[in-house]
């Protein structure tokens, strides 16, 4: 069974200013509409709605109170989101039009984690904010939805003490925020393949990666997939041999797509689909619940790439609707 978590509140619309960043802040709704085109009304049988936005009280599990107070101000928000003109906007408008959708997506990631634990496979059509640190937002990432999902599962007893989490980051950018969030967490194991010559440049964060796979600029799909196939099975086997893995988290950035202006790798659409299905297969063959987050992707094709993967998963795994 596969769950697809989505809310129409995910899309960010701020009088066109959001278009000053290459990130398509409306790709979540576009991905949903593309899925409806590909799957039809059957998609609704697998849809899991998002009940509300995440609260500050919940965010205090992964962020400092000082940071949450700081991003109420336009200048700090504009810096974290990398859209400088936003610093001149009224704070209330940014909180309503920009921050609120991110809060909904952050809550969606926690719901996705719970759905994966219950049903085996779940996808959030937004989220994957892997640059957000405990006391700093950057790289269009305000809130650490990934860390919050893990800590929420633990708080509710869905992940037991000592139960491992396997985090697989295949976004083109290294997930520095996730590394900082789990810097001293011995039960989260990080696998990260990324373009080694682009942001972020953080040696301290990279030291936290358990399987560190830096790639050359413009790495092509054949070589990329060879490295992934040679590395991921052994990584997962090493975790499952000694102790059970309770959850797999797959950060499936589409900025590896050839021509992406920020990712600067060179995978084709079929190669991205092959990558995604391979990752899911590795978790499923080991009986590990897995969730997917779309993370980065800075071309107009990003939403189609996301929808292609989810539609294939629905065809392969979607025989049972969400209860």
Image (cartoon, rainbow, N blue to C red):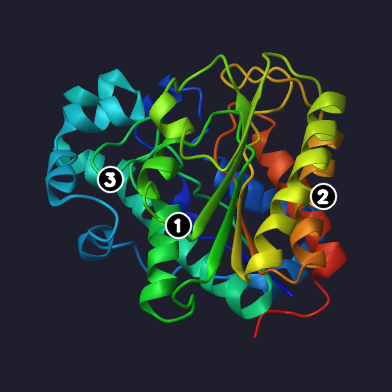
Secondary structure at badge 2 equals helix
Asked whether the viewer can see residue 183, the reply is yes
Question: Is 264 on the left-hand or right-hand side of 85?
Answer: right
Q: Are marks 2 and 3 in contact (CB under 8 Å)?
A: no
Query: In percent of the image, x 34 and y 54: which residue is there?
Result: 103
Residue placed under numbered mark 1 in the picture: 186
Residue 95 vertical position relative to residue 15 in the rendered view, above or below: below
Residue 246 vertical position relative to residue 209 in the rendered view, above or below: below
Alpha carbon distance from label 2 to label 3: 32 Å
Question: Is 70 on the left-hand or right-hand side of 155?
Answer: left
Residue placed under numbered mark 3 in the picture: 134
Q: Position of residue 47 (x, y in %)?
A: 63, 70
Q: Quadrant of the C terminus?
A: bottom right
Alpha carbon distance from label 1 to label 3: 17 Å
Indicate which disc residue 172 carries. Answer: none
Q: Which residue ends up furthest to the bottom in the rendered image?
A: 323
Query: In percent of the image, x 70 and y 76: which residue is there?
Result: 45
Query: In percent of the image, x 70 and y 17: which residue is there?
Result: 259
Alpha carbon distance from label 1 to label 2: 26 Å
Quarter of the image holding residue 297? top right
Secondary structure at badge 1 equals loop
Q: Position of residue 295 (x, y in %)?
A: 55, 41
Mark 3 packing: few (<14 Cα in 10 Å), some, or many (20+)? many
Q: Which residue ends up furthest to the front in the rendered image?
A: 242
Q: Earlier in the sequence, mark 1 or mark 2?
A: 1
């Amino acid at each position: 069974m596969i769950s697809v978590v989505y809310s129409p509140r995910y899309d960010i619309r701020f009088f066109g200013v959001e278009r000053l960043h290459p990130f398509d802040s409306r790709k979540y709704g576009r991905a949903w509409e593309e899925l409806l085109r590909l799957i039809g009304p059957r998609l609704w049988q697998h849809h899991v709605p998002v009940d509300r936005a995440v609260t500050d009280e919940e965010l205090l599990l992964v962020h400092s109170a000082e940071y949450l107070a700081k991003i109420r101000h336009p200048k700090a928000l504009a810096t974290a989101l990398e859209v400088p003109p936003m610093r001149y906007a009224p704070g209330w408008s940014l909180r309503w039009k920009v921050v609120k959708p991110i809060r909904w997506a952050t809550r969606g990631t926690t719901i996705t984690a719970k759905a994966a634990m219950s049903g085996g496979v779940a996808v959030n059509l937004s989220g994957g904010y892997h640059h957000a640190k405990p006391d700093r937002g950057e790289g269009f990432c305000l809130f650490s939805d990934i860390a919050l999902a893990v800590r929420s599962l633990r708080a509710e007893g869905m992940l037991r003490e000592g139960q491992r989490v396997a985090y697989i980051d295949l976004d083109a950018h290294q997930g520095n925020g996730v590394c900082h969030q789990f810097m001293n967490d011995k039960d989260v194991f990080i696998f990260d393949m990324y373009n080694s010559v682009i942001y972020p440049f953080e040696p301290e964060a990279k030291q936290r990666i358990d399987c560190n796979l830096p790639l050359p600029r413009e790495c092509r799909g054949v070589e990329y997939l060879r490295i992934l196939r040679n590395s991921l099975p052994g990584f997962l086997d090493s975790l499952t041999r000694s102790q059970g893995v309770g959850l797999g988290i797959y950060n499936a950035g589409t900025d590896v797509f050839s021509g992406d202006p920020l990712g600067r790798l060179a995978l084709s659409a079929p190669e991205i689909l092959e990558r995604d299905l391979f990752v899911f297969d590795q978790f499923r063959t080991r009986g590990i619940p897995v969730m997917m987050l779309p993370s980065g992707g800075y071309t107009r094709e990003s939403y189609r790439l996301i929808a292609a993967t989810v539609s294939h998963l629905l065809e392969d795994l979607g025989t049972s609707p969400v209860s």
